Amino acid sequence: MSEKRVAMVSGASRGIGAAIAARLLEAGWRVSLGVRNPERLSPSAGDRLVCRYDAMDAASEKRWMEETIARFGRLDGLVLNAGIMIPKTVLEASEEDFDTTFAVNVKSPMRLAQLAWPHLEKAPAGRVVTLSSLSGKRVKSPGSSLYALSKFAVLALSHGLRQCGKESGVRATVICPSYVATDMGLALTSPDPATLTQPEDIAKIVHMVLDLPKTASISEIPVHYSVEDCY
């Protein structure tokens, strides 16, 4: 088994996920990228494995996990980054909108954590890092309320995992950014992209959390590009 640590990153084809994967590879990690369309990325090579992952397809999650363990033989960190935002209020949202949002943002991360857990328990310092949002801590606007509903659940998922790892030493942390300069973030806000939190900023935070020993358990990290009343 390689001594290099291994991380799986969902939604790693662009934005925050791609920045996290790049940061970890530069730091000497082996990284398994879970993406919907692996053919759009350069092929797997060396410490970088590209696998198909679709949050709406539970079978793809299982195959991704199997391919990662077959290739690298271990798992030290799971980064749950993939997510969607349907800009509707809780009064406008259809059942289909609700089901899709929760399938991608909540159910798939929970299933991935279940698959990863036995491998993380074997690691010297297993970690689950979940990307939620400040919308998981407050509802900023009517149009963000469906999204917030799912991100509150993501926050609870991370806290649930944190409790599950109390004895085994698998630590769980949830990161809650405000707007980030990604395609999704820029579609929802109008400030100069240069003033927003950058994907590389979040990647630095994720790397820091993954590097921590079992003796440092951090539950939440709220991140804002400016100053908000509470965060």
Image (cartoon, rainbow, N blue to C red):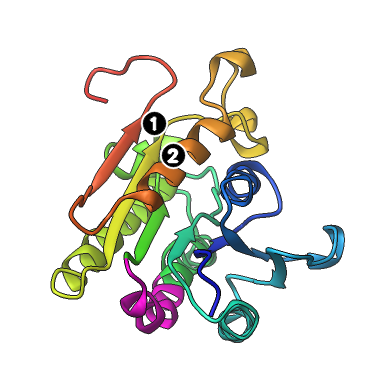
Disc 2 marks which residue? 144
**Left or right of 12, for residue 41:** right
**Left or right of 124, for residue 39:** right
Residue 58 magenta: no
Q: Position of residue 209 (x, y in %)?
A: 36, 47
Location of residue 12 (image quadrant): bottom right
**Left or right of 117, for residue 170:** left
Location of residue 176 (image quadrant): top left
Q: Which residues are magenta?
A: 110-124
Say the numbered circle drawn on residue 194: none
Dot 2, crowdedness within 10 Å: few (<14), some or many (≥20)?
some
Q: Secondary structure at mark 2?
A: helix
Q: From this view, report whether residue 207 is shown above or below residue 56.
A: above
Disc 1 marks which residue? 141
For the C terminus, the quadrant is top left
Amino acid carrying mark 2 in the image: Ser
Q: Is residue 90 visible?
A: no
Amino acid carrying mark 1 in the image: Ser
Q: How many marks?
A: 2
Q: Secondary structure at mark 1?
A: loop
